Image (spheres, grey):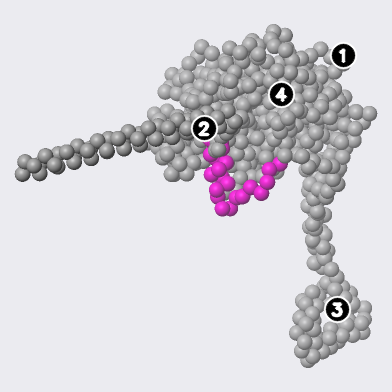
Amino acid sequence: MEGCSQGWGTSGAKTLEKARALSRTLTLTRMLMLVRVYCLWQELKKLVQLHQERFVAFEQPPLSEYDLYQRKLRSNTSIAQKGSQSNEDDRTVDTQTDEVGCADSEIQFQLGDDTQFENLLSAMQSGQEGLRQEALDGLLEKREVVGNAVGTNNLSHFLQHASQAVESLLVENFASAEESKDAGALPSSKDMSSAFQQDAWHVAGVGGFSEHPLMTGRTPSWVCCNPSQGSTILTICNELPGQLSSDKLAGKAVLLVWDAASPDYPVNVLVGDGNPTCASFSPNQNFIVFAGTEDGNLLVWDLREARTAQTIELAEELGLHCPVRFAAYSTRSMAVTTTQIHTSRIVSVAPMPSLAASRGQLSFQIVSSDDRGLVSFWLLSELTQAETETVFDLGIQIGSSIRLVRSRSLSIWGSMDVVPRPPGRKGGPGQPLDLDTLSMDMLLDSLGPGPTVQGLNFYPGDANQFLVHAGDGRILHRSRFGNAAPPREFVCGPNSVPAPITACAFSPFLNECFVVGCADGVRLYRTTCAAPLLTWDTQDAVCEVRWSPNRPCVFFGMTTLGEFITWDLSQDDRKPLLTHSLSNEFKTSAPAAPSFCVVAGPSKLPVVAITVAGTTAIRSLAPALCRALPDEEKLLLSLIDSALS
């Protein structure tokens, strides 16, 4: 056993030594291979150079609130976007744009009355020979009897067939005589003493609301009408300086909705935060009201909302017999940078002009402008029940589904390549203002101190071009997209001193014609001419101008002292037609300037709603100022053409 173990020990030692030698050989071989690979790699490295290139495989910016709304709108199966307007294929092509007139006409049948003629046609189309022959024989027999009749028979037959035509002609003549009697002679300065009817002013709230405690310390300062329902008017009631109301709505915005047919008591009382400066209705719905305030906020009311326990209790405490409604949306708590929303007095708020009405859903655009020249565009939409529970927006009030989304903001001073900067503004010309990256200090430094803008008006039917009337007497032509077409500024005349512009109104009949009111009179412009076509001087500043909704040549104006002035260009284009002083009927020494609007009342004649001396009153216009003359639009166009030549 010992010899065997010694043999095995010698053999194992030799085997282990051979294994170690083999391992050293393999290790050396592997090291040599690695050295060769490394040398080869070093040689290849000198020949091969790697280039590094970076690229973005997928990039998608975050969607804004407006983009989310557009995606939701296009996801509807009933609405699909077929294309977008880029204006690259704009060409001047003659197209048929005139409306095709349709009128009913009558036919005199030679083979009898229309019933027999229809029977004959149906018999001939039926293909039955017997029926066709019978119808022809009956008609021929009747014609033979009529042809052989004498004297009295012919006269009676004629009277029998002509009696209906004579009766209809008499009815038409009687109606025409009544209209001529109501209209009277053509209006002129000799046979018209007033622009209103003989009836007196109907003071709104005379049935008891004018003495309500809610009106103590408040005065009407603004009035406007509803374009979709003309009999509805809206008044803004602001608190008098130093006379705060003692009711629970002290310091709140109060707007009253009236019905022109029965203005004894308001229909709705709208309550909000702030001091309203301007308001308007939605373009196609009569249940949306929005207003702008002095501190730059927008308020929206939805008149469809059901009355809550809070509003019912508040109405009972105030002693009101109409609903009290709080604002459904307010921009006070919007999470937007201060350079993209208003921070000063809002001077204009109105719906955007649009030719296409919303189909089946509440959606339209609003434009607002402040006195510093910042213009904001908003999209008003109605949220569904599911969206109301998921959307987080601090502006939506409890129980409301109305939402405002700011789509864009721009400054009228953003491009100064044509219009020079007003005094006091820094920066060189041609430098646009980037509102997304601009700080408030830089924005105020660019705009300059003090209010500079008095109002804004869009071109009728054009959502791209608008006019801005400034306090220094200039009327600026601006555009949402691209550069505005010339003229980019409307002047007050070669020999006139610039006066502050207070009001502007486009003609509803001739869209290229507009009239402005200023501190020294009224001017008539055309959008293609920078200078005024006609100018009329007034003793006092004109604070409001409106066109007549019925006559193209008639427009109205109101001065700060309460003079209601009527112009009729078809009678005299050198001076106003009539001047009606309201100082004899109202005390015009009120702190707020008078305001008025022309309302399509419940009757055939439109009415004028005014706010003067803390009173809202309604009165019908004279019939002669409401019925258009033959070819009056052509008369206005010829008058403008003659003024240009």
Between marks 1 and 4 in the image, the one whose residue lies nearer the viewer: 4
Q: Name the residue carrying label 1.
A: 495
Is residue 355 magenta-colored? no
The crowd level at tag 4 (other Cα within 10 Å; few <14, some 14-19, many 20+) is many
What stretch of residues is rendered in magenta?
Answer: 60-85
| On screen, residue 459 above or below 560 | below
Q: Name the residue carrying label 2.
A: 40
Between marks 1 and 2 in the image, the one whose residue lies nearer the viewer: 2
- Nearest the viewer among 564 and 295 is 295
Q: Earlier in the sequence, mark 3 or mark 4?
A: 3
Q: Name the residue carrying label 3.
A: 111
Query: Is label 1 in a helix, a strand or a loop?
Result: loop
In three-dimensional space, the C-alpha distance between marks 1 and 2, rounded to whole angstroms, equals: 93 Å
Quadrant of the rendered structure where residue 47 is?
top right
| On screen, residue 127 above or below 53 | below
Q: Residue 218's x, y, as percent?
A: 53, 21
Q: Earlier in the sequence, mark 1 or mark 3?
A: 3
Quadrant of the rendered structure where residue 283 is?
top right
- Nearest the viewer among 434 and 446 is 434
Residue drawn 55% across the image and 50% down it? 76
- Nearest the viewer among 81 and 599 is 81
Mark 2 and mark 4 in contact (Cβ < 8 Å)? Answer: no
Q: Amino acid at mark 2?
A: Leu
Q: Name the residue carrying label 4.
A: 468
Q: Amino acid at mark 4?
A: Val
